[in-house]
Image (cartoon, grey):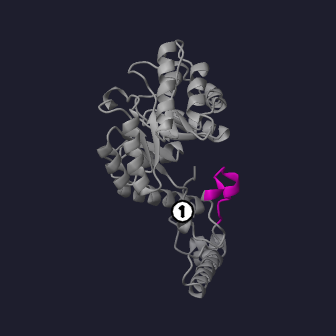
């Protein structure tokens, strides 16, 4: 073909066979795979067929929890996702009633008109009212905030003694969940003060659920290095805390997603529950839980909880489905 235009038969002379002959074996194998899939679907019309010719992702090597791995004979989109707990912050009986009616499974009770300063210790009468509203629902947990004053979390001996008395009074009112936290002047966890409050919360029975509140964000701001997160979470676990409330050291949880991801990993190693807080709304909580891997979030009492639960379940189902076909991941 030098110096001239190749003819239509030139490729045939060079290759020795036509283009159709070259690709015929590939087409035949593709048609055979399609027919195999169709026959399998006709044989099992009620099951979602998983094509054997498509390589499946090995979830045992991805670090996904067993609770989110579908069974071999179960469709990925029918696998039960890990439940998500939604917590509401309330400061009155009306707020508690609205949150319970909306579907919140945990209520953090604060003093009336104290949300503008971050919340304060509620009186025992308000906690008793919240317990009455929760008992009507049957499966709602009540936790009380322990914070004697607004401002920082460095308390002197008198403030700490008053907080211990408040915890004893709230426990006598029937509360078994407490949200607390103390820091030193240097911005570290005050282990002595926190331990005193945890001991008062547990009482003689030792049946309290203690959450270290967003004072941990002050520690994260002072020492933002990720290598110290595991040590921080380990110290809280040793003090007797079972939960941690955090926005990742940022003003909102959206800005601290990277740190929240590291916190969630550290909490998993030490047996703590991470609760995402700070600017949580019904619009952004699905993305926050997906990006951080957390399974609990706290928002205001006015959030549309039933609609949000449906959105979260569908979001988790789509993530499980994507991991089955190699399209996504499962945290």
**Residue drawn where x is 52% and y is 57% of the image:** 319
Pick whichever, 302 or 144, lies toward us.
144
Residue that appears at 48% across and 40% down:
175
The spot of residue 79 in percent (x, y) is 56, 65
In the rendered view, tell whether residue 128 sits above or below residue 212: below
Label 1 residue SS: helix
Mark 1 Cα shell of 10 Å, populated few (<14), some (14-19), many (≥20): many
Q: Is residue 50 left or right of residue 260?
A: right
* Magenta stretch contains residue 27: no
Residue 112 rendering spot, x and y as whole percentages = 31, 33
Question: Position of 39 compared to 166: left or right?
Answer: right
Q: Residue 167: percent from the left, percent from the top? A: 50, 30
On screen, residue 237 above or below 298: above
Say above or below: 66 vs 170: below
Is 112 displayed left or right of 128 in the figure? Answer: left
* Residue bearing the label numbered 1: 321
Name the dominant secondary structure of the magenta segment.
loop
User: For the magenta stretch, what is the residue range?
Assistant: 55-67
């Amino acid at each position: 073909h030098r110096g001239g235009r190749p003819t239509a038969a030139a490729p045939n002379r060079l290759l020795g066979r036509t283009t159709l002959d070259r690709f015929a074996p590939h087409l035949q194998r593709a048609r055979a795979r399609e027919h195999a899939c169709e026959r399998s679907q006709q044989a099992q019309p009620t099951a979602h067929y998983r094509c054997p010719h498509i390589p499946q992702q090995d979830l045992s090597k991805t670090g996904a929890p067993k609770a989110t791995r579908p069974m071999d004979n179960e469709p990925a989109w029918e696998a039960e996702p890990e439940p998500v707990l939604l917590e509401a912050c309330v400061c009155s009986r009306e707020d508690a009633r609205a949150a319970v009616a909306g579907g919140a499974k945990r209520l953090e009770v604060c003093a009336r008109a104290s949300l503008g300063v971050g919340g304060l210790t509620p009186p025992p009468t308000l906690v008793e009212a919240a317990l009455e509203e929760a008992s009507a629902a049957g499966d709602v947990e009540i936790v009380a905030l322990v914070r004697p004053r607004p401002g920082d979390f460095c308390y002197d001996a008198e403030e700490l003694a008053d907080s211990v008395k408040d915890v004893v009074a709230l426990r006598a009112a029937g509360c078994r969940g407490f949200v607390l936290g103390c820091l030193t002047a240097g911005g570290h966890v005050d282990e002595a003060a926190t331990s005193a409050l945890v001991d008062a919360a547990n009482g003689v029975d030792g049946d309290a659920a203690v959450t270290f509140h967003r004072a941990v964000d002050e520690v994260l701001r002072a020492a933002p290095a990720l290598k110290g997160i595991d040590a921080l979470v380990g110290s809280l676990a040793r003090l007797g805390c079972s939960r941690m409330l955090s926005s990742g050291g940022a003003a909102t949880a959206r800005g601290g997603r990277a740190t929240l991801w590291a916190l969630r990993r550290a909490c998993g190693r030490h047996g703590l529950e991470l609760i995402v807080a700070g600017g949580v709304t019904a619009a952004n909580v699905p993305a926050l839980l997906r990006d951080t891997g957390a399974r609990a979030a706290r928002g205001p009492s006015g959030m549309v909880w039933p609609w949000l639960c449906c959105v979260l379940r569908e979001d988790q189902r789509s993530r499980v489905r994507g991991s089955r076909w190699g399209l996504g991941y499962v945290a």
